[in-house]
Image (cartoon, helix red, strand yellow):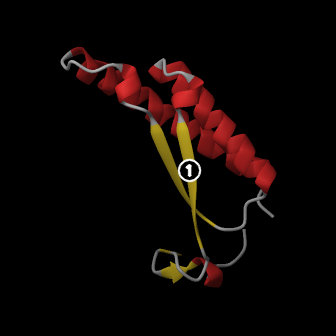
Amino acid sequence: MVKWKWVKAISQIILGMLRVLARDVGTVHATRDTTLEDNMPEVYVHAVKGRTLEQKRALIKDITDAVVRNFAAPIDAVTVEIVEADPTSKAKGGVLFSERAPR
């Protein structure tokens, strides 16, 4: 079973990345004739299957809140998608997740 620490740790990593992106995107918008509404923020999270619906909801909420806060985007404009892979279709360090020792 995945612990809530994982959700919190991933949320903190994503928040840090979004802060950097927000700084860079703000610079880009200042030089173009587009509005923030034209650039709907989309965030994709790639993960191995196995998270509970509750964990996914918590992660999506944290990511959405971070995008709204850091990009000044309306909440309805934020899209978050969790892309799940079967443990037999994804590997880390050359070892399939289905064959890795549980943590």
Element type where label 1 sits in the image: strand
Q: Residue at x 46, y 75 (%)?
A: 93
Badge 1 density bin: few <14, some 14–19, many ≥20, Cα 10 Å: few
- Residue placed most toward the observer, 2 or 71: 71
- Residue placed most toward the observer, 47 or 103: 47
Label 1 sits on residue: 81
Q: How many marks?
A: 1
Q: In the image, residue 47 lies at what x, y percent?
A: 58, 61
Q: Residue at x 78, y 58 (%)?
A: 52
Identity, as a three-letter code, of the amino acid under mark 1? Glu
Q: In the image, residue 39 lies at what x, y percent?
A: 36, 30
Residue 9, picture quadrant: top right
Please give left or right for residue 73 compared with residue 54 in the image: left
Q: Residue furthest top?
A: 30
Q: In the image, residue 48 lies at what x, y percent?
A: 61, 67
Q: Residue furthest left?
A: 31
Q: Residue at x 58, y 83 (%)?
A: 88
* Quadrant (top left, top right, bottom left, bottom right) of the C terminus: bottom right
Please give left or right for residue 70 compared with residue 61 in the image: left
Residue 10, picture quadrant: top right
- Residue placed most toward the observer, 86 or 10: 86
Please give left or right for residue 98 compared with residue 32 in the image: right
* Quadrant (top left, top right, bottom left, bottom right) of the N terminus: bottom right
